[in-house]
Amino acid sequence: MQLPFFFEPRLPHSGSFVLDEDNSRYLSQVLRIKISEKINVTDGNGHLAVAEVTVADKKKSVIEIETIEQFTAQSPFIHIAIAPTKNPQRFEWFIEKACEVGISSIIPLETERSEKSFKKWERAARISVSAMLQSRQAFKTELQPQIKFHEFVNSFESNKKYIAHCEEGEKCEIERSQAENTVVLIGPEGDFSEQEIYHAISAGYEPVSLGSNRLRTETAGLVAAVLLKFNIR
């Protein structure tokens, strides 16, 4: 039976540790874990501990770390730079699923045709943590601050750079490389403007196809993440 999975960003490498109130409540009142039972705890940065519960309290549960393992982040790193959707719930859905897939970072883009900025960052952070725990990962997907399209395209460094857009023209297929970090640009519901597409191509981004169907923004982002993470063709 798998051990329950918890997230504690301040996790020490040894000794005893007091869980925060949310985790303490979840441990004692929701999961009803008792003293001497064991749990997994991660800091989201690659450390995964096996710990024994020594105090089961709804406000201040205490654990004793027995072992801790440092995992190495899987490479190559996958970054999805995506325009937030007009409906914030659809963007939250993308964040949840992309984090479950295990991509490295999500970068919200402000584009010419963006209709809304995403503002629920505290909620998004909670969603990303929940997705990490659900999928039992030791690394948390980084949620970066929103950035203007041109600023991002001019500054982001990556070995492989793609732009997914709906305009006609020659497009390649996504290729996953074991040695190359990759970023994919996903546009808003009205697509990137011609100027943005031209600017990205001039900056070394390759137009890429995500299939013959026209996809919603959040679906396109997830398809790109899956293709890159699992090299599906």
Image (spheres, rainbow, N blue to C red):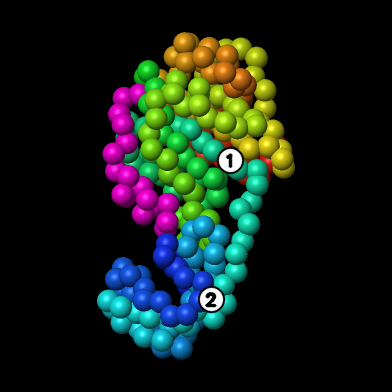
Which residue lies at the image location 64% right of the left edge and 30% below the top edge?
160
Q: Viewer-proximal residue, 13 or 201?
A: 13
Q: Report crowding for label 1: few under 14, some 14 to 19, many 20 or more residues within 10 A (C-alpha).
A: many
For badge 1, the amino acid type reads Ile
Q: Position of residue 35 (x, y in %)?
A: 41, 88
Q: Position of residue 50 (x, y in %)?
A: 53, 76
Disc number for residue 78: 1
* Residue 11, above or below 197: below
Disc number for residue 50: 2
For badge 2, the amino acid type reads Val
Q: Viewer-proximal residue, 143 or 189?
A: 143
Number of numbered callouts drawn: 2
Residue 116 among those drawn in magenta = yes
Disc number for residue 146: none
Q: Is residue 189 visible?
A: no
Between discs 1 and 2, the one toward the N terminus: 2
Q: Is residue 123 left or right of residue 97?
A: left
Image quarter hosting the C terminus: top right
Q: Is residue 209 left or right of residue 37?
A: right
